[in-house]
Amino acid sequence: MFPGNCLFACLVKLCLLIQIVVAAPTYREHACTDSKTGTNLTANTTYYSNLNLLLSYLTSNATINGGFHQTTVAANTADAATGLFLCRSDIAVTRLSTCQECAGNASREALRRCPTQKQAVIWYDECWIRYEDGSSFYTTPGVVPATSLPSNQSVADTEADRFNDFLSNAMNTVADKAANSRQLQGKKFGTDEEEFTSLQTLYSLAQCTPELSAAECNMCLRSAIGFYPSCCGDKEGGTVFLPSCVTRYEFYSFYNVTGTKAVSPPPGKGKSSSTTIIAIVAPIGVVMVFFIIAFFVLRRKQKKRYLSVRLDSVRYEMERGDNLQFTMDEIETATDNFSDDNKIGEGGFGEVYEGTLPNGQKIAVKRLLGRSGLGAEQFKNEALLVAKLQHRNLVRLFGFCLEREEKILIYEYVPNRSLDYFLFDHEKRSLLDWTRRYKIIGNIARGILYLHEDSRLRIIHRDLKASNILLDNDMNPKISDFGMAKVFVVDQTHGSTNRIIGTYGYMSPEYAMHGQFSVKSDVFSFGVLVLEILSGKKNNFLHNQSHGAGDLLSFAWGHWKEGTPLELLDPTLRHSFPRNEVMRCIHMGLLCVQENPALRPTMATIVLMLNSYSVTLPAPQQPAFFHRNRMQSSAAAKDHESDRFTSKSISLSVNDGSMITEVYPR
């Protein structure tokens, strides 16, 4: 064979191989659930015939309606079969044949993998199929059964905390895109790319079944995102599959970028009509372009003017009292020009440096990242709040600097770093004996009580976690990082937002799922923190016990129900601890993390619980985010979904608009 012919043959084979690889659907997960009627699926029955007919319909209609089809066979009969097929929207735009192949594969695999169940859901990379016996799906989004697939690769330990905050932000962004149908002509689908480092870009995707409303899609996606801390914490990739939605992230582009762009409508028929349309549209287009350019020019000027006013208001507020303004020269001298040797921390909004003033006083310098409006908002929020707060268990603000477009905050230096530095280290945790831990719990409670009730403002912190609790020379805790705090007017008790920010695992369910926050949101975070202090374990640690799946709340609840709550205690404390104090703290922690906010105690009650044994504690109910076995019964799942979905969303306006109306992810 001539070399040219050989090369041609190889190219043909390579093209065929690439086509096969591109087109072949990839199975990911499946879930089989019991029938509502309690009877198994068997061949040679009417329902089995209806189910096969249903799957045939789904496959044959996989290429219409943008890759979505939902139907019922034998509706309103005892043997009705209902199901849906959904192709991933970026694939439906570019490769409809793959959608049909995926539907066929998924139909066959569902019957093979769930041979005796009348209800099943099977997920592929490219599509998923869901079916059940009955004439219709549940009236609320399908959030169970749920399953997840984490990557085998983990991010570097030094980047773990920053990555988890970054991931929280990215998944919230893509969930908003999908729920609000910004891509692909209104489909419940969204993708996003965010640069994590100069060499790493995080790609994320979210999709809901199209029959869901925006609110239902949002609820489903928040449920999916809530699994990430326990399934995929610190992992370079992860996917969560729910019957009505899917979320996924990777450090590589796993979706068709071309297919994520909105599709233009087909051109009109006929040369004459096209010419007429162009003649009408062209002048309008020119005018519109002119107005758009003018709008953005004016908006940019207005934004600069507004930002200047905002920052001037910060100076005014802070300079009314003591002289808190530092010069940039003073800051650079104190930190040795922001030397890496002086860097003591890094977070979602900036870096923290140790510094020394000319009088020898140690300071912590927080340098906010970037010159964006986000940094300015963070600066204003934290500066205005912390400058007005005075409590021994809150980090004290010494001053600020606004020069050279920098936004810098100067705090008291707290030498013993943060609580997580000791608590989650196998060697350092021994420095936290029971007396110190009990004192830390009590002082954190007093600090939060001050924020909620005793300061001039009612403040919801919204990001209470071990890394935001700093420890001074005497290991006294000081609550830090008020960049996401909310200020309430005197009689206000609740608020809501469409932008969910914070750290998963510490967020209350009503906030993570619906954006509703209150003082009880902080109480939930405090409860998680108490259980971490007692156990020495992070909330998203994985265990192999028979107490449920995955997280610390499940672990604690399992031992509480079995009458072995002391098994929760950090082994370094097992030989010396006052049983009554430990039991009371476990009991109190479980009360704080109950799913119903109304059942959680207030911080005033918590402080009373810690200081008085005459207060009788009620029996705790099941914690929020206590993940039952993911193959739980549909009936139990339906009850859980209904309770969660019917809770009312509260939307309140607050008179201090600059500090309450805009919320940013972190």
Image (tube, grey):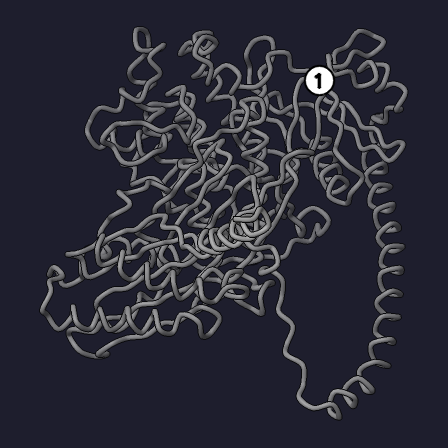
Does 233 sit above or below residue 566?
below
Spot occupied by residue 393 in the image (x, y as percentages of width and height): 59, 22
Does 10 sit above or below residue 150?
below
Q: Residue at x 64, y 29 (%)?
A: 347
On the question of residue 6 being in view, the answer is yes
Residue 567's image quarter? Answer: top left
Q: Nearer the viewer, residue 161 or 64?
A: 64
Spot occupied by residue 151 in the image (x, y as percentages of width and height): 44, 36
Q: Residue at x 49, y 31 (%)?
A: 234
Number of disc labels = 1
Q: Nearer the viewer, residue 201 or 618?
A: 201
On the question of residue 494 being in view, the answer is no
Q: Nearer the viewer, residue 157 or 203?
A: 203
In the picture, the quarter occupied by the C terminus is top right
Kind of element beneath mark 1: strand
Name the side, left or right, on which 337 lies relative to 460: right
Residue 374's image quarter? Answer: top right
Find the residue positioned furthest to the front.
1
Does 635 sit above or below residue 450?
below
Spot occupied by residue 86 in the image (x, y as percentages of width and height): 41, 64
Does 490 sit above or below residue 546?
below
Query: Label 1 sits on what residue type?
Result: Lys
Name the side, left or right, on which 261 lies relative to 532: right
Q: Disc 1 marks which residue?
A: 343
Residue 406's image quarter? Answer: top right
Spot occupied by residue 112 in the image (x, y as percentages of width and height): 21, 55
Graded by Cα atoms within 10 Å as few (under 14), some (14 to 19) or many (20 or more), the crowding at tag 1 reads some
